[in-house]
Every structure is written in C-alpha cells, then in structure tokens.
Image: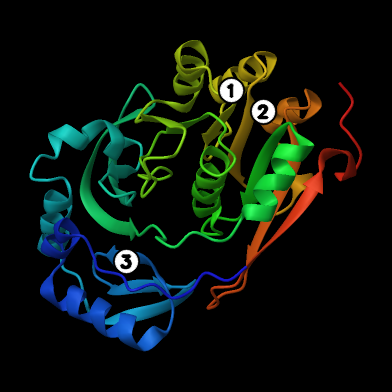
Amino acid sequence: MMIQKQTYNLPDFVKKALPSSVFLDFERTSRESRGNPEEIRLRRGRKSEFLFSGKSFLGERCIGREEMQDVFYKLCGGSVYAHAETVCAGYIRAEGGIRIGVCGRAVLSGGKVTAVHDISSINIRLPCKLLPSVKDLADSLVDIGGGTLIFSPPGGGKTTFLRALAYEISGRLGRRVAIVDTNGEISAGLDNEDLHIDILEGYPRGEGIEIAIRVMNPEYIICDEIGSRAEANAILAARNSGVSIIASAHGESAERLIEREEIAELHRAGIFENYLSLERKQGQSLCKYTLINRKNIGGLIDA
C-alpha cells in the first residue's frame, strides 16, 4: 500500500521553536531524502536526527543545553506549567496531530513522576497527511463485524491507519464513529463536513470510551495504544453495549500480543474479531497489512 511523497511544511510553532541550523538541516534533508518526514529528534550534546520514511539522517552539529531548554520552552508555548501533567507522562500535546516526546531528569514522589527537569531529548513526531487507501479493508471489516486490533512495532503507521479507517467508515460507509483521541493525533485532518464523527480529545482512553458509549451512541469507537487495566475494562463494557472497537497496540505478532494480560482478556472475550498486522521496510513508503481472523491466532486462549 503506497503512501506517496508529500510536500510538507512545518507548522509555524515548530519552525519558531527549532534552532535555525536544525531547521535548515531539516529542509536540506527533506529535499535530498526522497521520503516522507516522520520525526525530528533533538538530543542534548548530539547531532539532530531526522526520520524520513523510516530512514534516519543526521544533522550537521550538536545541540547544546541552553538550546534544548529554549526549544522545550517554545514547544510548551511559553508555559511549561500548562503542560506539566503530560510532560510527566513523557510528551507535550500540540496542535495538528503532532506529538512531542520529551525525556529528562525525573522528580519522584510516592513512586510517581511529579516533574521533569533538565530536558535531554525531544522527539517531534509529524503526522502523515496523505491517508493510505483502505476502502476495501474498511468494507471487509464492516462486513465481518466485530472489533479490530491494529498492531506493529513503534513507528509502523498504526495511527495513520486508524485515521484512514475513521475517514472511510464514518464517511463513505456512513457509520457513527466516536474517536477517543487521548493525544490529539488520530483526528488530525478529519475535518470533512460529511463525516459522522464525534471526537473526544484529551480524555484518558478508559474514561473517554465510557463517556462515548453513554452520551454519543456510536457504532464504532476508535482509539490508539491500548493496554492498561482501565482501558481493558472500558472496552469490555463497550462490547457488551454492542459497540465495535477499532484500536491499536504495539506488538510484533498477534501471538506475542495476546500474551499480554489485558490483551489476552480482550481476546478471550472475543472483543477483536480481526487482527491487522502492519509492516513497512526501512527507507520505504510501502506499507503492507495482513488481516488475521482471531480463530487463526495460534489457537484460542482458554477462558
């Protein structure tokens, strides 16, 4: 499944936050890479790194301590305090479906991260604006019925696939879709006025799923990166209400995926009739998927 090279213009808030040398390196690499931009990585004391279609390119010079702090401050919109909660969880929420990962020195209280200082790494993840063609896949998933769990290792294109399926199912197929968009990534660009979509942005997944069921009457709920106990409980409640779940999780294979306790419980309950494996080779924009029926995953787990 080919995703064509896109002409990408960095949002103004990212341009203004980056050191000029990093921005110039990004522009040069964009022209030379022949790939789609995916990540801008900054590491204190190391060269900047750019990811284009899964292939890594290094910038020309290292990033200093003061530069890192300045980039972090600007990406927070001048108010680190306003982003304190998400920074403790490892990211800065940003507009346009961009997720900004941050690492530094954690401050702990009662075993929980209460603050992060001395920022050492920043990863700006850029959403793919061109959606893959999933028309036939969406038709198959609706015809088969039941939920779908999309999986791949990190960076495999799961969020882009969720976005594409949301577009098809809520648009051409006219089904009511609620997106629980905890990190503000899935719904980026889904602004077509004919889509039957309700977006719960910023909600914790478990709470967002419960609210969507209670007040929005969806036929499908879409969310990403599931795995916690609270999320598993909310998904079980959703299925008992007749709502189909389309979600994603990190994993290399379906067999390994269902070894995880919470995913195993959802598997036993028959939440996901379909498992969708994504695969993409490094340096290529070719993304392949394999649709697997739950009955074909190494035998069902006994309840």
Amino acid type at mark 1: Arg
Tell me if 126 is positioned left or right of 65 in this view. Answer: right
**x%, y% of residue 30?**
32, 80
Query: Badge 2 is on which residue?
Result: 262
Tag shown at residue 229 = 1
Say what secondary structure mark 1 lies in. Answer: helix
**x%, y% of residue 302?**
89, 26
Q: Note whether residue 36 is visible.
A: yes
C-alpha span from label 3 to label 2: 33 Å
C-alpha span from label 2 to label 1: 6 Å
Tag shown at residue 134 = none
The answer to the question of whether label 3 and label 2 lie on touching residues, with beta carbons closer than 8 A, is no
Q: Residues within 10 Å of mark 2 (few under 14, many from 20)?
A: some
Q: Earlier in the sequence, mark 3 or mark 1?
A: 3
**x%, y% of residue 116?**
25, 40
Please state, as top left, top right, bottom left or bottom right, where the C terminus lies in the image: top right
In the image, residue 83 above or below residue 167: above
Please state, as top left, top right, bottom left or bottom right, where the N terminus lies in the image: bottom right
Query: Badge 3 is on which residue?
Result: 40
